[in-house]
Image (cartoon, helix red, strand yellow):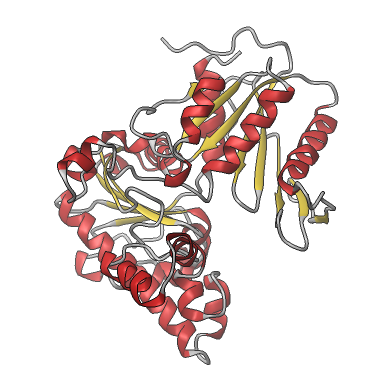
Amino acid sequence: MKKTLHNLPSGAVIVVLNCGSSSIKFAVFDADVDPLPREAAWSGKVEDITGSAPTFSASGRAAEPLALDRAQPYHAALAHIRSRVLGWLDGRPIGAVAHRVVHGGSRHFAPLRIDRAVLDELAGLIPLAPLHQPFALEAIETLLAERPDLPQVACFDTAFHHTLPQVEQMLPLSWDAWLGGLRRYGFHGLSYEYLSIALPERHGEAAKGRTIAAHLGSGASLCAMDGLRSVATTMGFSALDGLMMGTRCGALDPGAVLHLMDTGGLTSQQVGHLLYHESGLLGISGVSSDPRELLRCEHDNPRAEAALALYVRRIVREIGGLVAVLGGIDMLAFTAGIGEHNAVLRERICAGLGFLGLALDPAANLADAPLISTRESRVRVVVEPTNEEWVVAQHALDLGAA
């Protein structure tokens, strides 16, 4: 039986940190309430940490300019969040700090309490998730140094995909590569884990069949679930694989990478920057990584139009492949920023899937309703807001971190 934080002091909270390369999101959950509330008691973020105009915002209030130490902006952002959270708590104790850590490697499939040995092991996975792993670990290390008594928990974005069959994990490389840990791990697992809880709550048994979840944000992937378990996903060894994204390329002929290095004289670091930061919607359009901006200008900008067309085509192609793996589809679930709020792209994606007997209700789609397909549709199409922070907080509570 899982332990809970039964020995937490009265009024204790769990603080969740989600650290990226240019932003830090935080959420505070009231651990005194049973069950743990789905909505954070307080939340916010620091954005543009390494840019020219960093801001702090919290719980729906307008963003405010933030002056950060330019020598160590990330440490300064963490310090600002800590100060604001402690001020908001007004003396209430923190029971644990829980972190979204993108990569758990081939060993970590469940949340765990962090100590120095665990931190050092996770640092070895930085090359597999360079946009996120180092920043989560920096936050953990800072807290370990300043508050070694404070329990910290790591929750891994790769863990939900531990149920992938071996045939979905393997890469067509040498057997030695497989033994050395080169495999398809999958990502966005905390988001998909939340959907595995929320979809049956809202849609009952219908969600427990052949479901494809589309996590469409600045990063994007698909997950095929059967019985609410991951059986296939589009991201693989790294978060570059699969769908075209805001600035990431998605699946790419490796020969194209070799060509860039051979003919362009690019180093591996330069190629990495190109694939992570200068590709996808931004790379093709030359305008933005945000599809909302591209939709506003696509009629006058052929590159913006081409970027959106390829974005939709890649999603439709990958969904088709996952339908084949599942042997059919019962439900298509959209989540994350684009998936939850962009009715135009949902409509275009679903139009490409009409051969499956899928039909949208235009009014429901425009309203971002929980159910956006018609009664006649052979596939139930739904919109479900994700809640990764709650999943992380719940894991910390279940783990017994204190």
- Pick out the residue farthest to the top: 7
**Relative vertical location of residue 339 with respect to residue 147 in this rendering, above or below:** below
Q: Quadrant of the N terminus?
A: top left
Vertical order, 109 against 190 (above or below): above
Vertical order, 293 against 40 (above or below): below
Q: Position of residue 242 (x, y in %)?
A: 33, 59
User: In screen coordinates, is 328 left or right of 94?
Assistant: left
Say if 358 sits above or below 88 in the image: below
Residue found at the very far bottom of the displayed protein: 300
- Residue at 56% across / 79% down in the picture? 287
Q: Residue at x 53, y 37 (%)?
A: 100
Q: 150 left or right of 289?
A: right
Image quarter of residue 35: top right
Position of the C terminus by quadrant: top right
Q: Position of residue 300 (x, y in %)?
A: 53, 92
x, y percentage for residue 237?
33, 48
Q: Position of residue 334 (x, y in %)?
A: 41, 55
Look at the image and tell me whether residue 169 can be seen.
yes
Q: Residue at x 33, y 42 (%)?
A: 185
Say how many tags the image has: 0
Quarter assignment of residue 389: top right
User: From the viewer's perspective, is 245 left or right of 19?
Assistant: left
